[in-house]
Image (tube, grey):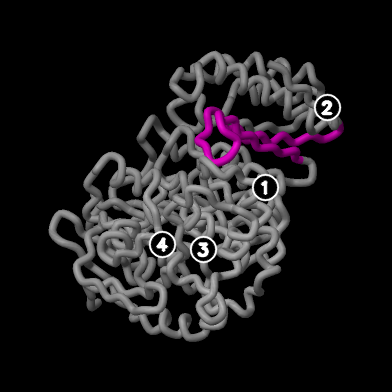
């Protein structure tokens, strides 16, 4: 297979071809330092504040889709075949303000202005997808944009009013989609990309089989899908990641299959991409899913990446373990499948051999007799890391509990099932007393640690109370919260 060393993409209205791109070069640094496009701001350099928000368009199954992403943790090497749109590219008819910009001005949505370009880009992405958004949709789109001085009320009013100043159909980015899609398609030459200087190398496999071969040949490589975690390794900890294998462009890892009994997700499917399936097939996860980071991170981050990095406070493992999920691992052409809970061995250690990667996740769909819930406890409601995360799945027939799967994150060195609590429920009547006994048994399942997010005692009390909350909610009783 022939290789090339250039990263090729569109930046606003121009083609960019970059030879020898370092794996650690961020899009934010490239925009500000190399191209002097300084409308994109650096606030946090970790994907939290949204001041660096840009749009990235890519082809998937022939369709061109734009998403709001954090430029501070997006690597330039990952942009091969994409269209990057910054705030400088926005314009209305005859060079006037863009409708999003006009709405922000008219509704006094900016004060100091530092965060404003990122907010404008998030609202631009929302407007193209949902021209008449509700306030709830606006709030969700702005989860990843922090503003210290304006207050969000005028920004929300501006977002709701954008279509009074123009329609997406008249927007130049919408009108140029055919031409842009053709240019992006021309970039796809079916070749592997190997680029960057020695010690900062980036590899973009040509396809899934090429990825398997490349990782088998370089088992020490850093595999990067959404870069929502690895981005911080670079910007905050200055960690070397070479050689880095970028996989976000591999459509085969974005495959989704829905059968009568399960959903199978390619490991490269982002949180945002799987969200419609969540709403349709796993509605108990819908609210929980909206609390995973902010919109930009959900557009970049992948379910497989969240599993593969093995964090004990990852958002997806507890709720997927509770559903009985399995992962398929691949090394070269060899695959093996194991229960998701068995993948996590110890803190920072997974059942994953050198050169082996998570290829897909199979999530069984709950039966009508199964009652499910997902809970996330964090200091801040939106865009925060869990102190405790819980997935609960209980099957009830004839008023008797037939099966129970309770999985928690933040309670141990790995995402872990509460085996003693599960056993306490089996064969017991569906009653508050049964869940109270299970909550007491949970003290034998976990010995949580104290850290700056929560104390050990708080974590245990929360985990036990979530069982009581589950029963009350499923039983239709009011949940009374007290200090």
Q: Nearer the viewer, mark 3 or mark 2?
A: 3
Residue 478 tag number: 2
Compared to 386, does 467 lie above or below?
above
Q: Are the residues at dot 3 and dot 2 in contact (C-beta closer than 8 Å)? A: no
Q: Give the residue number, with chain letter if any, for mark 3.
A: 67
**Distance (Cα) linking label 4 and label 1:** 24 Å
**Distance (Cα) linking label 3 and label 2:** 39 Å
Q: Give the residue number, with chain letter if any, for mark 4.
A: 248
Image coordinates of residue 248 in percent, x first then y, are 41, 62
Q: Is residue 459 visible?
A: yes
Image coordinates of residue 430 in percent, x first then y, are 81, 26
Image coordinates of residue 16 in percent, x first then y, are 31, 75
How packed mark 2 is, by other alpha carbons closer than 10 Å (few <14, some 14-19, many 20 or more), is few
Image coordinates of residue 270 in percent, x first then y, are 51, 56
- The span picked out in magenta is 370-398
Measuring 53% from the left and 55% from the top, which residue is drawn there?
Answer: 119
**Distance (Cα) linking label 3 and label 1:** 20 Å
Query: Is 135 contained in the magenta span?
Result: no
Where, by quadrant of the figure, is residue 213 drawn? bottom left
Nearer the N terminus, badge 3 or badge 2?
3
Instruction: Kindly state the secondary structure of the residue where label 2 is placed.
Output: loop
Q: Give the residue number, with chain letter if any, for mark 1.
A: 286
């Amino acid at each position: 297979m022939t290789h090339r060393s250039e990263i090729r993409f569109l930046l606003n209205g121009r083609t960019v071809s970059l030879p020898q791109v370092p794996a650690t070069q961020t899009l934010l640094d490239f925009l500000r330092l190399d191209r002097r496009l300084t409308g994109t701001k650096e606030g946090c350099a970790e994907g939290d504040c949204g001041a660096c928000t840009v749009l990235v368009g890519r082809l998937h199954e022939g369709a061109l889709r734009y998403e709001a992403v954090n430029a501070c943790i997006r690597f330039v090497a990952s942009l091969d075949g994409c269209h990057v749109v910054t705030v400088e590219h926005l314009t209305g008819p005859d060079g006037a303000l863009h409708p999003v910009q006009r709405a922000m001005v008219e509704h006094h949505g900016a004060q100091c202005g530092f965060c404003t370009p990122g907010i404008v880009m998030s609202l631009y992405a929302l407007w193209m997808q949902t021209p008449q958004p509700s306030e709830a949709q606006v709030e969700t789109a702005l989860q990843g944009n922090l503003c210290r001085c304006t207050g969000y009320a005028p920004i929300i009013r501006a977002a709701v009013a954008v279509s009074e100043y123009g329609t997406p159909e008249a927007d130049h980015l919408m009108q140029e989609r055919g031409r842009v899609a053709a240019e992006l398609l021309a970039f796809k030459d079916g070749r592997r990309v190997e680029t960057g200087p020695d010690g900062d190398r980036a590899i973009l496999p040509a396809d899934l089989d090429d990825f398997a071969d490349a990782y088998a040949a370089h088992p020490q490589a850093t595999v990067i899908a959404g870069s929502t975690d690895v981005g911080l390794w670079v910007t905050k900890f200055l960690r070397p990641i070479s050689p880095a294998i970028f996989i976000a462009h591999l459509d085969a890892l974005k495959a989704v299959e829905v059968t009568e009994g399960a959903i199978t997700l390619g490991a490269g499917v982002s949180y945002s991409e799987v969200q419609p399936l969540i709403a349709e097939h796993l509605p108990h996860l819908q609210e929980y899913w909206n609390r995973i980071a902010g919109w930009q991170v959900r557009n970049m981050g992948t379910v497989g990446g969240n599993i593969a990095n093995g964090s004990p406070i990852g958002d997806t493992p507890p709720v997927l373990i509770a559903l009985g999920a399995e992962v398929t691992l691949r090394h070269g052409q060899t695959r093996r499948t194991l229960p998701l809970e068995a993948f996590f061995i110890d803190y920072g250690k997974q059942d994953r051999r050198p050169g082996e990667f998570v290829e897909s996740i199979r999530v069984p769909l709950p039966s009508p007799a199964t009652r499910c819930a997902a809970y996330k406890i964090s200091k801040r409601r939106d865009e925060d890391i869990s102190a405790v995360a819980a997935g609960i799945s209980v099957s009830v027939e004839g008023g008797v509990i037939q099966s129970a799967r309770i999985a928690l994150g933040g309670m141990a060195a790995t995402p872990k099932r509460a085996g003693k609590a599960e056993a306490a429920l089996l064969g017991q009547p569906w009653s508050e007393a049964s869940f109270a006994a299970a909550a007491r048994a949970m003290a034998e399942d976990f010995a949580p640690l104290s850290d700056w997010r929560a104390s050990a005692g708080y974590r245990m009390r929360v985990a036990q109370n979530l069982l009581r909350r589950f029963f009350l909610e499923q039983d239709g009783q009011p949940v009374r919260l007290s200090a």
